[in-house]
Structure formats: structure tokens, C-alpha cells
Amino acid sequence: MAATSYLIQPPPPVRAFAVAAVAALLGALLLVVSLSSGWHVAFAVIGGVLLVAGLALTALALYVMRQATLRLTLREDGYAVTGNGTRLEGAWREVTRVTATKERERLTIHHHDDRRTNLVFPIAQNSQIDDVIADVRGRLDAARFRD
């Protein structure tokens, strides 16, 4: 079996993006109006602060999304989970069972009683977790058949 990879991404933080957009637009509007109308400097400063805060929130939301993204690679001999500077690996011969929650949002790979690897899938990616479960099941069966 060839190796397969799955990208597990969190849902976009829509609320953070909406707050950032509103803050940036209000800040830009306040900045332009205060400078063009000759208002007190404090209004321009407040507008600038809102604009910078909106841009910073956007950057932070993008950074958090990128950091929370994982890559699951299933190979013939085992699996690897990489992301955020970490790498977890496991061999199929050490896996005792694989479980999923009813909501199909979390997949747990059990290694005897001492180790577990939890993979959390966003609700919107339910079809992806079904593909991963089918792939893991096939690879576990193939590994047990070889042993």
C-alpha cells in the first residue's frame, strides 16, 4: 500500500475575522474622517489604534490556524502525525485498537494501555474522518495479516 496523507485543519475563526474586519474598517474610517475634518488628534489616534488592532487580530487568527494544522501520514508499517514542530509516530503492530466518538469528531489510536494518539477533526470534515477510519482499518488488517 502506498502512503496516504490527510491534512487536518481547524475551521476558520470566522468570529475573529469578523471582529478584525469591523475594527479595521471603523479604525480606517475614523482615521480618515478625523484627519480630513480637522477633528481633535485623539480621534485619529483612536482610529489608528483600532486599525492596527484589527490587522493584528487578523494576523493572529491566521497564525493560530496555521499552527493548529496537522498532517496525518499513513504508511504500510505505521503512521506519523506532524504539525506545530512536533512529530508523533506509531507502528501498526503496536496498535491494540482504534476508536471514534459518536459525533465522529475524534479518532483515538490506542497503543496497549500506556499510550494514545488523539486526532480531533472539525465537525465540517466528517467525510474526512470516515476516509481516515477506512484507511486505518485497511492498514491494520493488512499489518495483522502480515504478522
Image (tube, rainbow, N blue to C red):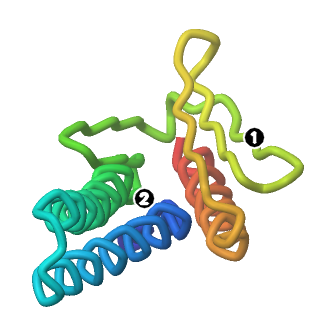
C-beta proximity under 8 Å, tags 1 and 2 = no
| Res. 70 visible in picture | no
Dot 1 lies on which element? strand
The answer to which image quadrant residue 24 occupies is: bottom left
Q: Nearer the viewer, residue 131 or 102?
A: 102
Q: Which quadrant of the figure has residue 40?
A: bottom left
- Crowding around mark 2 (Cα neighbors within 10 Å: few <14, some 14 to 19, many 20+) is many
**Amino acid marked by disc 1:** Thr
Which residue bears the numbered disc 1? 99
Residue 137 in the image: state x and y as whole percent. 67, 57
Q: Residue at x 84, y 53 (%)?
A: 103
Q: Secondary structure under badge 2?
A: strand
Residue 112 picture location, percent across and down: 61, 17
Residue furthest to the bottom = 36
Report whether 132 appears left or right of 70.
right
The residue that disc 2 covers is 74
